[in-house]
């Protein structure tokens, strides 16, 4: 019962984040670039993204509709099947810390979609830094390997 309340509370927060997330995108040199410190406008806060590239294989990544929205220290979005959420802390130097991902607990009848969503959530757990550049958000692991690439949502 207590776990159900926790999951419901997390889902409510995620829904609020997703609904209230703006569709504005920050572009240009920003966190994670070797060219210097980011501009104050180059932040994740208030931005929404759609996944376009990933280090994991997926038969139709664009068709999955994986999204990420950053609002008030919360990351929320759609993982392909489930809604998800996590806390986040983004630093001016491009460091990014994501909390544990919580999600709804539905499954698709398509095992490839389930596998892609699981791989996406696993990639989020490995994120250590980010870069905003040319309308794209790129997330990297601790070794600097590219994990996920998003384009700004309309």
Image: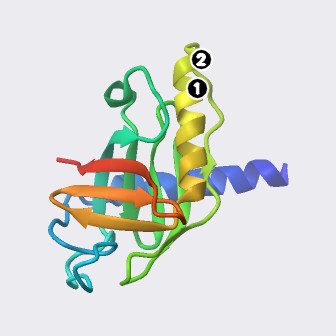
Q: Label 2: which residue?
A: 111
Please tell me whether residue 29 is drawn above or below residue 126 in the rendered image. below
Numbered circle sitting on residue 52: none
Q: Using the rendered image of the protein, determine whether residue 60 is visible from the camera's viewpoint.
A: yes
Q: CA distance from mark 2 to mark 1?
A: 5 Å
Residue 154: x and y, percent? 17, 47
Q: Quadrant of residue 110?
A: top right
In-image side of 25 versus 69 (left or right): left
> What residue is disc 1 on?
114
* Labelled pair 2, 1 in contact (Cβ < 8 Å): yes
Colour basis: rainbow
Residue drawn at point x = 55 percent, y = 48 percent:
123
Q: Is residue 95 above or below residue 58?
A: below
Which x, y percent locates residue 125? 60, 56
**Could you tell me residue 127's position as x and y percent?**
52, 60
Q: Nearer the viewer, residue 9 or 108?
A: 108
Lateral position of residue 133 relative to residue 106, left or right: left
In this orientation, which residue lies closer to the viewer: 125 or 144? Answer: 144
């Amino acid at each position: 019962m207590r776990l159900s309340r926790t999951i419901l509370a997390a889902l409510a927060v995620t829904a609020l984040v997703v609904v209230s997330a703006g569709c504005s995108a920050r572009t240009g040199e920003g966190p994670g670039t070797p060219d210097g410190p980011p501009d104050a406008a180059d932040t994740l806060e208030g931005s929404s993204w759609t996944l376009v590239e990933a280090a994991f294989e997926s038969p139709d990544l664009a068709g999955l509709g994986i999204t990420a929205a950053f609002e008030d220290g919360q990351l929320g979005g759609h993982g392909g099947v489930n809604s998800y959420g996590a806390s986040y802390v983004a630093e001016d130097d491009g460091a990014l810390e994501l909390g544990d991902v919580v999600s709804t607990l539905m499954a698709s009848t398509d095992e490839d979609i389930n596998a892609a969503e699981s791989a996406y959530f696993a990639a989020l757990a490995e994120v250590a830094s980010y870069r905003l550049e040319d309308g794209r958000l790129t997330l990297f692991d601790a070794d600097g390997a590219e994990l996920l690439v998003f384009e700004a949502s309309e």
